[in-house]
Image (cartoon, grey):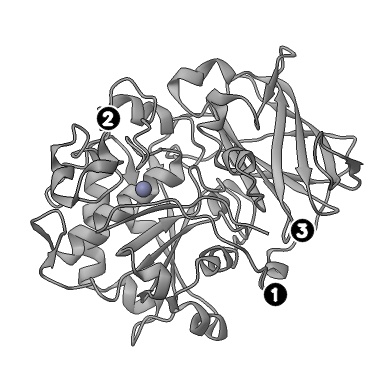
Amino acid sequence: MHRQPVRIAGAQPALFARSLMLRAALAAAAGLGGCGDDDNTLDASAAKVVRQCSSHVFSRQPFGQEVAVNRYDLRFRIPAGAQGFSIVAYTPGASTTLASLVDPAGFPHDLVTDEDLLRYHPAGLATAFGFPVEADQILIPPAPSQAFLLQSGEWELRADTGGRKVCVSIAVTETRGTRLELNVIAVGLEGMDAAALATNPDWNEALEVAAAIWARADVDIALDTIRYTDIDRTVAGRFAIISDWNDFADLVSTSEAPSSAAEDALRVNVFVNRGFAGSVGQYGLLGISMGAPGAIGVHGTEASGLVFGIADYLGVDSIPSPSDGEFTGAELIGFTLAHELGHFLGLLHTTERSGESDGLDDTPGCPGISALGPRGLTTCGDADNLMFPVVLPDSAGEISPMQRESVAPNPLLRPETLTP
Ligand SMILES: [Zn+2]
């Protein structure tokens, strides 16, 4: 079984990683209880993240494939006036794909073959390349050019799974908001538990850097309401230093929310460990978002968070960059956190390493990026954008109006008052 592409930034050029997966016993902790009745229409609500699981699936054999998959059809209702919604489908230990949607006007959207949607649907992309994934998610609309997708009323969803059961969660944006709430989970930091991290001046300086970048786009990273927790001690030892790509997904799979109420569920999990080593560390990797977008409002899946390794950077005054110049530790951690939050909210790189652009009209691109060495990267027109694939010293961390509009429908951007 395989993992989905993850989004990465660090001092070195970012990359996609798809790696083999070994499902750990941790997956069991994700739990799939509380299943609904397949015949019901799931009513999306701004008050909570609603979920329905298949009580039965039917088997089919996709054209040209030898292995049968199980299919789940679900109807769900988006309330009038909704500004956006997210869909997350998840099966622990088995590949899961959001296969298609039928909008309230009866128009079908194929999420595996539609080229416009594939761009914003990482698992669809992974499926196209033959990499099945456990969690699959999409934000509707995923970009301003796709705004026509947003419709209120009854939708039909089709999800494919290699397992015998699949759950689908939906979060809806009723009122556009600006407030982004974080959970920070301390994972085996040396001499520092979550409470100590919460009051560490260098960590807080890094958070201020991230908050200042997003504040310029009128997004408020709520530093005063971060929930700090320690990960279970036995689990912490396994993930304190990550050297296996599979561990990122297994670590974020340990995330939990105390309830499905919007207040608890609409938060981004930020796992903070010591660092990365081995094949993972050789890229100068600093942080990873486990999806673009991540599993919005859904905890306990392998796409339910970000992971940062900070021990080598926290409190460090000067970190040289391959592109010339230097960062402070707070700048490097803060900028990378802001970048990864951009992915988690649904933003793609302005230019992928392949040279492909994000499709937004107001972000410059750099089609020849793959031929540029580290020092040449500063010549790219998008080098000052937050979502440039490489973190550069002195980057302005710009967020364009269309990037801002792309994340606006995301339920994670909460209004000041949540629907009770
Ligand atoms: Zn990135």
Q: Identify the mark nearer the N-term, 1 or 3.
A: 1
Q: CA distance from mark 1 to mark 2?
A: 43 Å
Disc 2 residue type? Answer: Gly
Of badges 1 and 2, nearer the viewer stands: 2
Disc 1 residue type? Answer: Ala
Quadrant of the snapshot with the C terminus: top right
Q: CA distance from mark 1 to mark 3?
A: 14 Å
- CA neighbours of label 1 inside 10 A, class few (<14), some (14 to 19), many (20+): few
Front-lying residue, 378 or 213:
378
Q: Is mark 1 within 8 Å of ligand 1?
A: no
Q: Secondary structure at mark 1?
A: loop
Left or right of 118 on screen, residue 270: left
**How far across and how far down the image is residue 245, in percent?**
50, 66
Question: Do residues under tags 1 and 3 come within 8 Å of each other at their CB atoms?
Answer: no
Disc 3 residue type? Answer: Leu
Left or right of 104 on screen, residue 60: right
Q: CA distance from mark 2 to mark 3?
A: 42 Å
Front-lying residue, 364 or 105:
364
Quadrant of the snapshot with the N terminus: bottom right
Circle 3 residue? 32
Q: Identify the mark nearer the N-term, 1 or 2.
A: 1
Of badges 1 and 3, nearer the viewer stands: 1
Q: Residue at x 33, y 63 (%)?
A: 283
Mark number displayed over residue 365 = 2
Q: Is any atom of residue 31 visible in this view? A: yes
